């Protein structure tokens, strides 16, 4: 029973962390892309080109490995718990 | 107002500090003198200072509690005055199972056997434990593990706590960065937009008022 409770609430908690981290890293990437474009094209009023550059960059980001690494949020605590169980209970 | 703020800050610090002091592992240098089992009737308010019944068994309001009686080497007074005295310390030995605090301890019976073995001799041992001994509430720190050491002067480095506080610091910085990014990218643009709209409305009102004033003057 305790195990089920831990799994359910742990999953909910980690999902909240996973979602907020996904949003955060994507937002940082977007900001960097915008700054990159602005640095390369100073005083350039072409909004469409800027939007296209940012959209392309985000698409590349989405298909790269970096957003997938956020999945470690689920893996690391599981490994840590396994390690603690071993360290505490192995004589 | 500043005083109230300071008061609440100190209160928050004490509560969080107390929580961590209760929950994080600490090490005591002891000689186990005996092991014991007492029946315990939990009351509504001291129940939270006990963990759970042996993993896998039913939870009752009354159950047996494993205790370890020890002679404990006193730590330095207030952290910096050395002293060579001993005092008694009693630990409980309970499973935490899958629940809080997350020690995932299932081997209480084994630990009791180890302690009983140590109690036969007069050797020093290090007990890792969490929790407090409070006499008037009859609560005990929960022993998590025990290992024999050469003597009472052994120095112990709290690796887990070092790692934990580094992790806590990183997590706090991370949350701060996330919060700032959220404000900068999601909240600020909304506020800017709202301010812009208010400006436009005010400009519109001013214009209409001007028209009204001119019409009034014409009369």
Image (spheres, grey):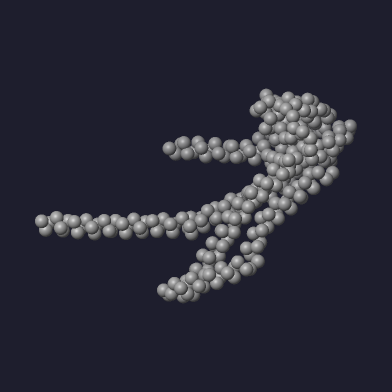
Residue B63 point in image, percent of width and height: 77, 28
Residue A88 point in image, percent of width and height: 78, 44
- The residue depicted at 74 percent of the width and 29 percent of the height is B60
- Asked whether B82 or A7 is in front, the reply is A7
Residue B169 point in image, percent of width and height: 61, 50
Quarter of the figure with residue A56: bottom right
Quarter of the figure with residue B208: bottom left
Q: Is residue B85 above or below residue B202?
A: above
Residue lying at the far left in this picture: please name it: B219
Quarter of the picture holding the C terminus of chain A: top right
- The residue depicted at 77 percent of the width and 33 percent of the height is B58
B95 relative position to B211: left or right = right
Q: Is residue B31 above or below residue A80?
A: above
A59 relative position to B161: left or right = left
Q: Is residue B182 visible?
A: yes
Q: Is residue B84 visible?
A: no
Q: Is residue A49 above or below residue B175?
A: below
Quarter of the picture holding the N terminus of chain A: top right
Q: Is residue B194 above or below residue B15?
A: below
Residue B126 point in image, percent of width and height: 79, 39
- The residue depicted at 71 percent of the width and 29 percent of the height is B139
- The residue depicted at 53 percent of the width and 70 percent of the height is A55
A48 relative position to B107: left or right = left
- Asked whether B15 or A66 is in front, the reply is A66
């Amino acid at each position: 029973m305790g195990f089920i409770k831990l799994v359910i609430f742990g999953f909910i908690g980690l999902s909240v962390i996973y979602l907020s981290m996904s949003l955060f890293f994507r937002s940082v990437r977007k900001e960097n892309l915008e700054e990159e474009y602005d640095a390369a094209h100073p005083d350039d009023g072409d909004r469409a080109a800027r939007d296209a550059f940012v959209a392309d960059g985000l698409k590349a980001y989405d298909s790269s490995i970096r957003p997938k690494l956020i999945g470690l949020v689920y893996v690391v605590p599981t490994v840590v718990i396994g390690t603690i169980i071993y360290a505490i209970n192995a004589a | 107002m500043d005083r109230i703020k300071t008061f609440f800050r100190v209160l928050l610090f004490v509560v969080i500090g107390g929580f961590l002091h209760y929950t994080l592992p600490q090490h005591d240098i002891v000689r186990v003198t005996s092991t014991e089992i007492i029946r315990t009737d939990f009351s509504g308010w001291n129940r939270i200072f006990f963990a759970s019944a042996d993993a896998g068994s039913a939870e009752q309001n009354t159950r047996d509690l494993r205790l370890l009686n020890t002679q404990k080497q006193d730590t330095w007074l207030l952290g910096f005055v050395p002293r060579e005295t001993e005092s008694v310390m009693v630990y409980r030995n309970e499973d935490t199972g899958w629940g809080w605090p997350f020690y995932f301890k299932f081997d209480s019976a084994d630990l009791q056997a180890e302690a009983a073995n140590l109690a036969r001799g007069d050797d020093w041992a290090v007990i890792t434990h969490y929790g407090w001994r409070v006499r008037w509430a009859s609560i005990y720190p929960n022993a998590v593990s025990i290992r024999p050491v050469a003597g009472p002067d052994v120095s112990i480095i709290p690796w887990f706590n070092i790692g934990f506080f580094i992790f806590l610091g990183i997590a706090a910085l991370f949350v701060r960065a996330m919060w700032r990014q959220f404000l900068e990218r999601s909240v600020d643009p909304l506020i800017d937009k709202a301010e812009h709209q208010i400006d436009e409305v005010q400009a519109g009102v001013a214009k209409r008022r001007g028209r009204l004033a001119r019409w009034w003057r014409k009369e």
